[in-house]
Image (cartoon, rainbow, N blue to C red):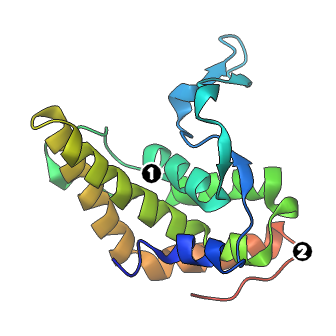
Amino acid sequence: EQVLGTLCRMLAAGELPLRVTHNDTKLNNVLLDPQTGCAKCVLDLDTVMPGLSAYDFGDGVRFGASSAAEDEKDLDQVWLKLDMYQAFLEGYLDACGHALTPKEIEVLPLGAKIITAELAMRFLKDSPTQNLDRCRTQLKLVADMEAKWPEMQRILHETAAVRCAQPTTPQ
């Protein structure tokens, strides 16, 4: 409970700014050019509103750096792929790291953990069948993030040092 409220408390204290965020940053919300594979545009714009950059980053990691589909029933198949986490972090910081505050950069991994846990609870509430599988998968992913937390932090600090002018401090 303490961890899940961290970003909201930081926002309330003025430590994090509100940004324009998508709030559903998954690969299937990007239209890709079939010839080049490059992104053409972002879809599902009805979710765009003020939000925290860490949540947008986190949802992208939750979806794109997971080893399994959201509804995977075999939890042994679910873990955080650190190489994909690093790739997502590199791309995110290359695209917008210059506009983020050092504190925003520092809490990016926390955004992944919090949004994954939040979605697990939302899935559990939605439906007793498929969403129970989705809930379990997200909780397993959170557990793996917690197990890999020191490595996630190391990757963040090394990547931010190379890609951003602002240093971050370990959490």
In this rendering, the answer to whether 108 lies above or below 59 is: below
Determine the secondary structure under disc 2.
loop
Q: Residue at x 51, y 27 (%)?
A: 28
Which amino acid does the dot numbered 1 rest on?
Answer: Arg
> Is residue 169 visible in this depiction of the protein?
yes
User: In the rendered view, does 25 fall on the left or right side of 32?
Assistant: left
> Is residue 72 visible in this depiction of the protein?
no
Residue placed under numbered mark 2 in the picture: 165
Residue placed under numbered mark 1 in the picture: 62
Q: Residue at x 72, y 77 (%)?
A: 14
For the residue pair 94 and 30, the one nearer the viewer reads as 30
Please identify the quarter of the rendering in which residue 13 is found: bottom right
In this rendering, the answer to whether 69 lies above or below 114 is: above
Whole-percent x and y of residue 12?
Answer: 63, 74
Q: Residue at x 60, y 51 (%)?
A: 56
Q: Residue furthest left?
A: 128
Q: Residue at x 66, y 76 (%)?
A: 106
Q: Residue furthest front?
A: 12
